[in-house]
Image (spheres, rainbow, N blue to C red):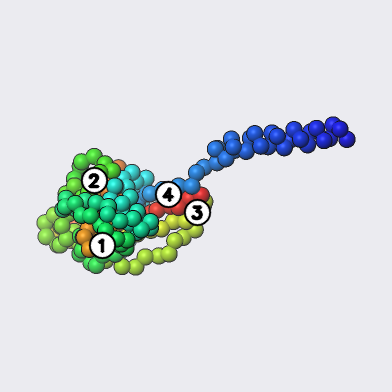
Amino acid sequence: MWGSTLLSQLSRRLSGLYAPIQDHLRPASRLELHYTITPVDLSTGRLGHTMRRRAHSWTLQAASLFDLAMLGSANITIKETDATSTTETAAISPTVVAIAGALTSGIVVGTGTGAESPTDFVIGTVVAEGVGAGQLSYSAMTTFAPPSAISGGYRCRVSRQVDNTSGGTIVVTEIALYFITSVTYCGIRDLLATSQSILTNTGRVIEYQMDFLN
């Protein structure tokens, strides 16, 4: 009886000792960001191999928009994509919804090669909308699927297709996600791990994936 009681007390003390260690070793809740790029043959609609990479570049603008939208903060100064500093004075509802051809919100692509930085406020060199030389046609971003269950949490997706009918090859080296309120802010910018040579009569489906993991 005495030995059993002692072992029980020792077991409880050891459990209390190891609990903080076990909690420390358990993966922390986190938000992971990835992007995918999938080639499209415009003549057949056939999709190519999807490249998926970890994104690295949430910006200060994204953090500020989170404060404004989720926490009700006010009087936060945020730099717009034209370098104007705007002070937001009330809670706002930023969106990435974009009509076809719009470059003021949603996913945009570029040809810049500057290093990523949390202080980025605009894509390096945006590829213009159109069908002329060096231009791409941007699809609308108006319909979004609800969060989907993944291992350990949930995933949110936003995607956009860009098509090349310019007659020449366009090399895309960077992508970004623009948020719009009454003005435009760059929330994410990524220098691509592998540049994308988009031949004429082909396109790319670009998707950002935000994983909420526990």
Near mark 1 (Cα within 10 A), the count class, few <14, some 14-19 or many ≥20, is: few
- Up/down of 21 relative to 75, above or below: above
Distance from disc 4 to disc 1, alpha carbons, whole Å, reads 23 Å
Res. 169 visible in picture: no
Residue located beneath label 1 in the image? 181
Q: Nearer the viewer, mark 1 or mark 2?
A: 1
Closer to viewer: mark 4 or mark 1:
1
> Is residue 200 or residue 97 the one in the foreground?
97
Residue 35 on image: x %, y %? 34, 51
Q: Secondary structure at mark 1?
A: loop
Q: Which residue is mark 3?
A: 153
Q: Of the two numbered discs 3 and 4 on the same chain, state the one appearing first in sequence.
A: 4
Q: Amino acid at mark 1?
A: Thr
Q: Amino acid at mark 4?
A: Leu
Q: Tell me the residue at 86%/32% (across/down).
A: 2
108 versus 26 height, above or below? below
Please give the label number shown on residue 34.
Answer: none
> Which comes sooner in the sequence, label 3 or label 2?
2
The structure residue drawn at horizontal position 48% and vertical position 50%, both measured from the top left corner, is: 213
The span from disc 1 to disc 3 (Cα, nearest Å) is: 29 Å
* Secondary structure of the residue carrying numbered label 4: strand
